[in-house]
Amino acid sequence: MQFKNFLLMALLLALSIEGAAQSYPTKPVRIVVGFAAGGATDIAGRLIAQKLSEATGQSYFVDNRPGASATIGSEFVARSAPDGYTLLIAATTSHSILPSLMTKLSYDPLRDYAPVSLLATSPLLLALHPSLPIRSVTDMIKLARAKPGQLSFGAGGTGTPPHMAGELFKQMAGVQMLYVPYKGEAPAISDLIGGQISLIFSNVVAVLPQVQAGRLRGIAVTAENRLPTLPEYPTVGESGVPGFAVDSWFGLVAPAGTSSDVIAKLNADTGRGMNQPDVRDRLASQGLFVKTGTPAELTSLMQSEIAKWKKVVTAAGLKFD
């Protein structure tokens, strides 16, 4: 009799969990973005919040919690209840680079989160001051080797994808370049236009207008393949550094322990929402390319990216507290 009662209780619990997942969400859902409004991560977050709201009839809203390279928002979600009502837009810096760069990170990108889905990726554009006698990546490598340390590259913060792209380029091309940190991408681009630095690996949407205006010269993209929106730019990999590829990525995650049924529903709703034509077009105009998948695929991406950037950070001797 006791065994039958145990089976009945287990069945009722399972039905209760399944019912809760099927009715999810029953109240507004917070999507935390660890950066200020207006950036690529924020844009991705607001678009998926809109589409999830449309899909479920419940409110999904963005909560911007910027600061400390997105660690403030990331830690907040890691410590939140695993009930599906607090989510995070995870990104390359917070969940791929900082685990190796920071000696004391307040969360574990793999242990403290339940991945939902990849959302989008964003390559960078390699641009330089037009006064330089450089028309290709091959030219750039030749000049850098002829004048070690004289070429400088800027980035809007240590540990950001533009900074790490420069460090990876140095290591793979076997060149020396001076890294100049800035408090944002805009001042780095401004100094590049003014000739204070030589080049930049920058988000496409941030630097392309200056290239198109003739103030800067774009020579390559950091994606694995040429971009359908900018087919005239070769990849760094095909231009002299085989195997070089840097894509910023953005994904949706929940606190670890969130119900697998809730994760499955979020994944399905996210896939449908992100792959709608209006979302693809809006993100493409911002230099972002929709790419969704399973929770397992996002986990695999995070693992490979953490391993990749750990090698770069270690080789460069970088530390950031």
Image (cartoon, rainbow, N blue to C red):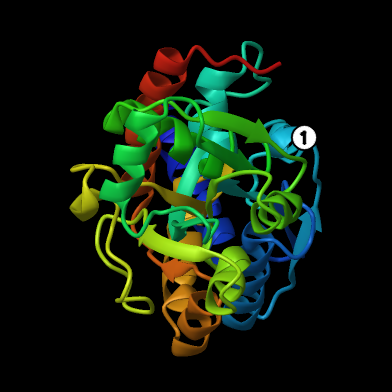
Q: In the figure, residue 43 lies in which quadrant?
A: bottom right
Give whichever of 286, 41 is nearer the camera: 286
Percent coordinates x, y for residue 33 in the rendering: 71, 52
Q: Is residue 210 above or below residue 84?
A: below
Please tell me which residue lies in front, 160 or 66: 160
The image shows residue 149 at horizontal and vertical percentages of 49, 26
Q: Which element carries disc 1, helix, strand or loop? A: helix
Left or right, 175 with respect to 191, comes to left
Q: How many numbered discs sit on the rendered protein?
A: 1
Left or right of 307: which side holds 166? Answer: right
Indicate the quadrant containing the N terminus: top left, top right, bottom left or bottom right.
top left
Q: Residue furthest bottom?
A: 278
x then y, percent, for residue 51: 59, 78
Q: Is residue 303 visible?
A: no
Q: Residue at x 51, y 19 (%)?
A: 100
| Viewer-proximal residue among 133 and 164 | 133
Q: Residues within 10 Å of mark 1 (few under 14, many from 20)?
A: some
Residue 286 falls left or right of residue 30: left
Question: From the viewer's perspective, is residue 307 above or below residue 255?
Answer: above
Give the residue displayed 32% in from the left and 33% down from the top.
Answer: 304
Image location (x, y in percent) of residue 303: 36, 32
Residue at figure coordinates x 77%, y 41% from the top left: 183
Res 73 → quadrant: top right
Q: Amino acid at mark 1?
A: Ile
Placement of the C terminus among the 4 image quadrants: top right
Q: From this viewpoint, is residue 301 visible?
A: yes
Report the side of 140 relative to 160 (left or right). Answer: left
Q: Residue at x 46, y 80 (%)?
A: 280
Q: Which residue is mark 1?
A: 72
Q: Is residue 115 above or below residue 205?
A: above
